[in-house]
Amino acid sequence: MLSLVVALSAVLATGLAQTATTRFPDGFMLGAATAAYQIEGAWNEDGKGESIQDHFYHNYPLLGLNSTGDVACDSYHKYKEDVQMLKDINADVYRFSISWPRVLPTGDLDVINQAGIDYYNNLINELLANGIQPLVTMYHWDLPQALQYLGGWPNELMVDYFVEYARILFENFGDRVKWWITFNEPAVFVSWYAAIGMAPSQNASGIGDYLSTHTLLKAHARVWHLYDEQYRATQNGSVGITLNIEGLEPATNSTEDAEASDRARQFQMGIYAHPIYSAEGDYPAVVRERVDANSAAEGRPRSRLPSFTREEVDYIRGSADFIGLNHYSTDFVTSGVTGISPSKTRDSGVITSYNEAVPWGFRSLLNWIASEYPGYPIFVTENGLRNSGGRNDTDRIDYYIGFLGALLEAVNVDRVPVIGYTTWTLMDNVEWSLGTRAKFGLYEVDFSSPNLTRTPKESAGFIAEVYGSRELPQQYFR
Ligand code: NOJ
């Protein structure tokens, strides 16, 4: 009898545990993400200024592989359709970005473009009328070209320009927007100050990227403090930054590869996260030491990575309410020196041996972030699969099954404090220089039709079911 009771309670416990693992916790936000340049089009309409993306794709068509976001998905005119699609997938949050030059065409406050402000007001109001929370990225790579003429992010003057832009956003939209992201994927956009190929295509390897990093960390902190001191009491929202990181697992079980994996994480995410989210602040020690040592060996009088003053370290530390995370796949890494000199890759002393989209890499990464930066909620702001198109996208459904399962295990079993998830992306769009050829969307966009007709793929139906039931059925857990 006793054994029967024990057996029965074991079965019940497993059953309960399974139910708990499959469900998103109450209040967990589910939705989809996009970015202005990739969907809006209307690149020069109603007073919008030129961005570095407009400039790059118009002036360097060969480098940009003939891509352009001039029209994109025409969301500038079709935002109501976008919102309807979000409603159809049962989204409760929409991550989109504001185009800085649509609001401030010169980047400065000399011209405030009311038509741009109206557009985002209309979008925000339409979202809220449909019960969808806006999650707004302030900077998804479209710097006003007028500011690039001043040097762009390597120039510390950008801090003031960015803070002034952020104030315009809080003033105009902060009554309704409660979730803000200052920067999207700094590791990626600073890399285009270190190499040719994407805007602004400045070839200052191992220098322009670190200078930009230094500027944007200061800009991020200033914007968080601005919100904290002047807007939080009345607007009551949250401000974070979105960092991208792959799964960066050691390729073998050697100590060298374990250290390489940690170094890779510090060079990719820690360089941004450590100053903001760690208890001690500042750049990670391993990054500081390696860049300083290489700079000295190159005969330079100063490190290529600038230093913060003590006051700046204290000011930046703690300047966020949550961690935004973009994650797609896992790189397997090994120790070794590669990359041109100077370069961030060479400084890191890490070689990527291969890459795979493995859900366990996501779970492992979420656990690493939670232990490295305790106390901060994590919002997964991008995750998704690229393919070459088609509505019968079972590969994408398979990807989401794996990654949502890993996410739920991290949340419900490992107790990683993830609070939201927005898939990349709502609809096929302009994947930077890959153009509209690369497809990430839950909806197909017919780029050859004048209406840019949107049609749900099978993955849209799958996501709608998961979001609607707030559960990933047990059968999908492997
Ligand atoms: C990262 C970027 O934030 C987004 O703009 C891009 O389209 C996706 N990931 C997919 O590459």
Image (tube, helix red, strand yellow):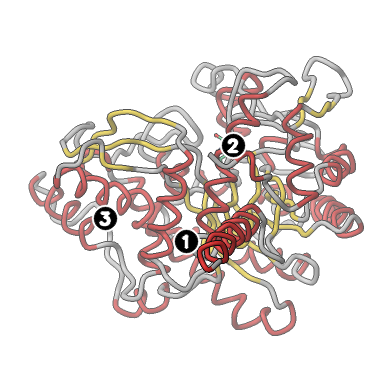
* Residue, disc 2: 384
* Residue, disc 1: 414
- Can residue 105 be seen by looking at this rendering? no
Up/down of 211 relative to 318, above or below? above
Q: Residues within 10 Å of mark 1 (few under 14, many from 20)?
A: some
- In percent of width and height, residue 164 lies at 62, 66
Identity, as a three-letter code, of the amino acid under mark 1: Asp
Identity, as a three-letter code, of the amino acid under mark 2: Gly
Among the 4 quarters of the image, the one containing residue 318:
bottom left
- First in sequence, mark 1 or 3: give its number: 3
Q: Nearer the viewer, mark 1 or mark 2?
A: 1
Q: CA distance from mark 1 to mark 2?
A: 22 Å
At horizontal 39% and vertical 43% (from top left) the residue drawn is 247
- In percent of width and height, residue 100 lies at 66, 51
- Mark 2, ligand 1, within 8 Å: the answer is yes
* Residue, disc 3: 305
Q: CA distance from mark 2 to mark 3?
A: 33 Å
Q: CA distance from mark 1 to mark 3?
A: 36 Å
Q: Residue pushed farthest front?
A: 1
**Element at label 1:** loop
Up/down of 133 relative to 253, above or below? below
